[in-house]
Amino acid sequence: MALPEVVSREDWLTARTRLLDEEKAHTRARDALNSERRRLPMVKITKDYQFEGPDGPVSLAGLFDADPGKGSLQLIIQHVMFGPDWEAPCPSCSADLSAITSELRAHLLKRDTNFVLVSHAPYPKIAKAHAERGFPFPWYSAFGSDFNFDFGVSFDPEIAPPTYNYRPQPDADLSDEGPGFSCFLRDGDDVFHTYSTFARGTEYTGNAFTMLDMTALGRQEEWEEPKGRAIKARAADPSFAE
């Protein structure tokens, strides 16, 4: 096994502070990239996507509701790989979700953002997997809808040319599924698609801040650009007290 070089404390501090300069530059570059993400245009959703959950059919707009009648401005959907003919969801998706607590969703809701899971499998399969794994998030089925195909995480050339991560996938099989996240914004009765990320773009979504960074409204804090996105811009508050 190749281990790091052994050096004196002074040499380690020299190397560490040099790396710190690079880390700070990376943080500033990431903040700038997040600002550009918030400046992306958005697309109005015109299809009547229908999902199935524990209470029956629900529309895309209905997924914004953490509780009946309590709709959020934003919605983050995690596309969980679970095909119609699969007996269980993707082990990698399951491992990621098992490390996330219910507090993450509570923090997102403090920033007017709901978080749900969506898979292509029929709902009875999802309900069984949900009960077995105990994920503390709502989990819905897009079976029978174009939703997964339109958002590039399920593949059927008869419905849409297979693409994943914005690249053609001519060899995609009907049994294939892809992981990802998609973000939506609601303005009155209208729903807009603001962002999606796939493949390695899903690796940095383990806490509320990184998930909010994917959305059009961001963390809704005073320092963020562009200005004027949040109804109530907050001071930076890692406690999510409000």
Image (cartoon, rainbow, N blue to C red):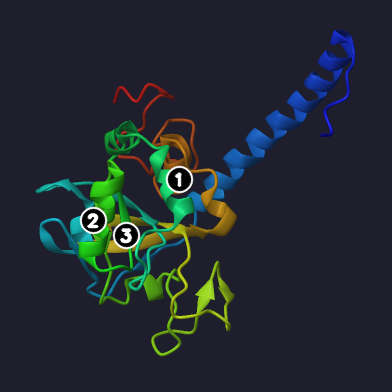
Residue at the disc numbered 2: 128
Q: Nearer the viewer, residue 210 or 98?
A: 98
Instruction: Nearest to the eye among marks 2 and 3: give it.
Output: 2
Query: Callout 3: helix, strand or loop?
Result: strand
Identified at 42% across, 62% down, the residue is: 81
Q: Earlier in the sequence, mark 2 or mark 1?
A: 1
Query: Callout 1: helix, strand or loop?
Result: helix
Q: Is residue 68 left or right of residue 71?
A: left
User: Is the residue marked by circle 3 packed among few (<14), some (14-19), or many (20+) residues within 10 Å?
Assistant: many
Identified at 10% across, 57% down, the residue is: 55
Mark 2–mark 1 Cα distance, whole angstroms, equals 17 Å
Residue 19 position by quadrant: top right
Residue 100, visible in the rendered structure: yes
Q: Is residue 69 left or right of residue 215?
A: left
Q: Quadrant of the N terminus?
A: top right
Q: Earlier in the sequence, mark 3 or mark 1?
A: 1
Under mark 1, the amino acid is Ala
Mark 3–mark 1 Cα distance, whole angstroms, equals 16 Å
Residue at the disc numbered 1: 95
Under mark 3, the amino acid is Val
> Outermost residue, bottom direction?
158
Mark 2–mark 3 Cα distance, whole angstroms, equals 14 Å
Residue 73, visible in the rendered structure: no
Q: Earlier in the sequence, mark 2 or mark 3?
A: 3
Instruction: Nearest to the eye among marks 3 and 1: give it.
Output: 1
